[in-house]
Image (tube, rainbow, N blue to C red):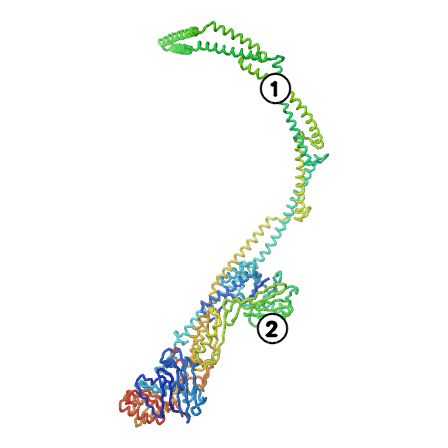
Amino acid sequence: MKIIHCADLHLDSKMETNLSAAKAKERKKEILNTFERMVDYAATNQVNAIIIAGDMFDTSRITNSTKNRVLNTIRKNAQIDFLYLSGNHDESNFISIMEDVPTNLKVFGSSWTTFHYPTANITGLVLNESNRKTFYDTLQLPAEQLNIVVLHGQIGQTNSKDKTEIINLNKLKNKNIDYLALGHIHSYIKETLDQRGVYCYSGCLEGRGFDECGEKGFVLLEIENGKVESQFVSFAQRQLIELVFDITPYADWFVIEDKILELVKAYDQTNLLKITLRGKYPIQLEKHIGMLEQKLDQFYFAKIKDETTLVVTNQDVAKDISLRGEFIRQVLASDLTAAEKEQTILIGLKALAGEDL
Amino acid sequence: MKLVKCHIENFGKLTNFDFNFTAGLNCIKESNGWGKSTLATFIKAMFYGLPTTTKKDLAANERKKYSPWQGGNYGGNLVFAINQKQYKIERFFGKNKAEDTFVLIDLSTGKQTKAFTEDIGLEIFGLDADAFERSSYIPQKLLDSNLNESLAQKLNQIIQGTTDNYHYEDAYNALDQKRASLSNNKKTGQIQNLASDIEDVVTKIRDLETSGQSVEILQQQVIAKDLEINALLQEQNQVKQQINTYAQLQQKQANQELFAELNAKVIATKNEIQVKQAVFERYQTTAAEIGTYVTLEKTIAATVNAMNIKADRDYVAQRYQTLSHYFGDKVLTTETTDAVYHDILRYNALKTQSDNVVKQCTVSGNHRQRWLSFVLALFALLSILGGVLLLPVQLVGAVFLLVLGGVALLGAGFVYLINLINVKTSMPQHFDLEQLSERQTEMKQLKERINTFLEQYESGVTDYLTAYQNLMANIREYAQIKVQMAHQNDELNELSQKLTIEQKQLEKYLARFNFTNLTLNNAEKLTFLKQTLLDLEQLSVRLATETQTLEQFKTKKHFDVNESVVTRVDINELQQNEKKIQDRIDQKRDEKSQLIAQINKIQDDLAALNDLEYEKVNLQNNLNNLTDTLQAVKAAMKYLKAANESLATKFLAPMKNGLDKYLTLITECEFANLNLDTDFNITFEEYGKLREVDYYSKGYQNLINLCLRFALIDVLYGQEKPFIVLDDPFVNLDDDKIAKAKEFLQKLSENYQLIYFSCHESRC
């Protein structure tokens, strides 16, 4: 038996804010497309069931177009069971407003719901305020059978103030769980639960912002001879890559530019790239952020975040008797914050150099 | 600090160039285009290096401007003396700063030294490259400009580090313009516009969110509808169960009826078998055995058929009897029959001749005369009838007709009479009546003889020849029949014996079976037996099938045959009730569909919300950036203004003293009435009134300008005085002023090392 464990699709959700409106729309479609590709993969590889461990949608706002595509995909693949567990972002009552729920779309409720298969039992529960304290005790699984448990929440000890539900792994130990399929964390994590089982976050299918960098995809479970084997399948259409570059050692901007361009050669240009510049630079260094962004234009998306700090002290300008030196001294002596000082100095120097502000 | 010598490997147009400097005034007289500015820049580059910039303008990009025209190593070395020691700077330049090399050699040891770093210019002079260049390099144009127009500007350039045509005011104004374009107070300000855009987007979001709230209400209504539908479904299920119970009872009833029907069939079949089996009560035969007797019966039939030849035999016998009677005891010989035959032939010949004679006599005229007499008679009759009829009407006519009729009647009688006479007289004349008479006699004799013979066998014979032939045929048949009769009698006896045996055998067999109330011949009996046996076989199969069907029915239906299936439920009422519930369910489902359609429509509208929120975040980011920029611009304006005032205060007094000193030195008179304001504007007080420097001649203005530059150098540089490069600054001075300027330089060279370029002897 083969099962796909995925989660956190966040269909119809907001994208990385620096994307253009057109590209943001395109990425939304790509995320939906990746879900459909995953189902095609399941059909091709004779997968029996797809577990969606929460956050299939992002908010209560689902476009009809997205809803209809998802339903069509589910209906078209009647041989595959879609085991849907609502997450903290699934505010849409997706199922309740459906006129005709496909028979192969099976939903976990707020009490333990088990779907029985010849070689495994898949048990899940939607965590909420009413069951969060009791769900550990009410979980009863037969020791002689293979048990997969589905939950959506953050592993931890105490409940958070937001909508996120907390899952205390210690309380799920020795409960005859072979595979704990989790949703909520957007990166793949697989660790030992107890002597018998493992817990696993599948991560999201596609990264949406630079807080979701790296490989994204789903987990493929294969059950044979009473054992479950799992492997992560990297499946995202594009990856989000964040690189941090320290400019401190370089006094020449063109060297920095060359180094960065060399660095990004290792990455596929279909990806989304963010380069964070860090470190300190002297007042003599002339930065050309816009030019560098233009050179990275061959990437699907590239942005440079400048977190560098201008390093200028009174000592540096002590021998500069010009208005520029005096201006810097005045700014450094002010009670502005370091960031304000840097911005003030840079714009003042631009004005003195007659450059466009 | 003094320059000692330099070697240029390659720098701009200069290549493999060497120059030895003297302390004091170094006058270099070369024509324009020789490379004076190149040498000046080389000296500066040795102390400060070359800046790296992306500027494409050649004038603003020295690294690019002075890259060797002829290629080769870009740079050279410079020897200078400071603090009683000589050092050699070796610098070579690449495409950018990282490719540059710097080596400092202490010439007293000949080894590299770290007494100074590559920032040696800053370390020695205490000024950065720009300040150094702007203070120690005095180009031709500096003194060649109108003092009133340029003095303050030039001084500002020197101390402000700005470009030739740009200074504090420009920078401040640029910042102010930026502030105005960003300003959050003006309607045209970018921040205000952006804030307005954000407000618009927020309003749209709020409106959509308001309509989005109704989605939740509608979703609750959908859930409520689902609950109602579920309740109705439960109610409907109960009714369906009742209907189902009724249907089950109906089914049971139907089963019982069907069972009874099937059972009746089994019983009927059993009875039928019993009846059929009664036939074989005394003896159980087989189909094969019946077949044997069928064959026997066929044999019998064949024998009977054979004996039916008896029918033929009867004919033969009859014929034999007839012919025996026909012939009696008479024995006919061939002579007898031949004689008769000749008589017949003779008779027929004579008769033919006689007949022909009679015919010839009676045929001629007979017909015509008869016809005429007939016509006349008819005419007479008609005339008389007409006369009688006409008599009462017209006497004359009637008489005429009666007379005419009488005449015609007479004519007819006459014609008839004539006809009779003609017959008598028409005999052929050539016939011999005697001969005719003899022949008739012979014919009579022959006839008598023939009749006598033939009448023994046939009566009323007219055609003697045919009678004779019949007789002869009978004679031949009679002979054959006699033979046949003997043979057939033998065969018949044999068949008769066989038939008797077979019939007995068959009768014996058939006697074993009961053919009650049946009048059948043997063949029909055998067929009956055979059919009965076949029927029994089929009935047996049918019974098995019916019995099996019955058993299966019982097993499959699991019902109690004796169970009471009476129900008092009104099925119509139940069905109507179910339909009513179904109608209500359909209605609720319609209502649910309408709610979902409303939700879908709102959600489609809400799809724009994501885009709006996305736009809002982007606008807000832009606003934050612009606000930060505005704050930075405001701060830059504030601190730039403060820096400008601070500098002015710091440089004003030393500058004025220096200016006084150098003006006195060059003009050998005091300028007690000179005034210098914070913008370095020079005015002179005369008769209690401040006059612009423009009142002085251009030559004076140039000299004042030169003095101001040296005053500035005094202010800028501390203990270590720099070398000063003068690029033919006196080109426009008259001879008197040139002399004073040269004298001024000589005096200055006591304190400064001067590198003075000129392209004319008169200015050296």
Circle 2 residues within 10 Å: few <14, some 14–19, many ≥20: few
Q: Nearer the viewer, mark 1 or mark 2?
A: 1
Looking at the rendered structure, the secondary structure element under dot 2 is: loop
Q: Position of residue B231 (x, y in %)?
A: 58, 57
> Residue B170, located in which quarter of the rendered image?
bottom left
Which residue bears the numbered disc 1? B480
One can see residue B348 in this view: yes
- Determine if marks 1 and 2 fall on one subunit: no
Q: Quadrant of the C terminus of chain B?
A: bottom left
In the displayed structure, B591 sits above or below B754; it is: above
Q: Position of residue B343 (x, y in %)?
A: 53, 10
Task: Tell me the chain of label 2.
Answer: A
What label does residue B553 carry, if any? none
Task: Tell me the chain of label 1.
Answer: B
What label does residue A157 carry, if any? 2
Q: Is residue A348 left or right of residue A111?
A: left
Looking at the rendered structure, the secondary structure element under dot 1 is: helix
Q: Position of residue B48 (x, y in %)?
A: 40, 85
What's the residue type where badge 2 is placed?
Gln
Circle 1 residues within 10 Å: few <14, some 14–19, many ≥20: few
> How many angstroms separate mark 1 from mark 2 (CA)?
140 Å
Q: Quadrant of the N terminus of chain B?
A: bottom left
Residue at image point 56% right, 52% down: B580
What's the residue type where badge 1 is placed?
Gln
> Residue B426, located in which quarter of the rendered image?
top left
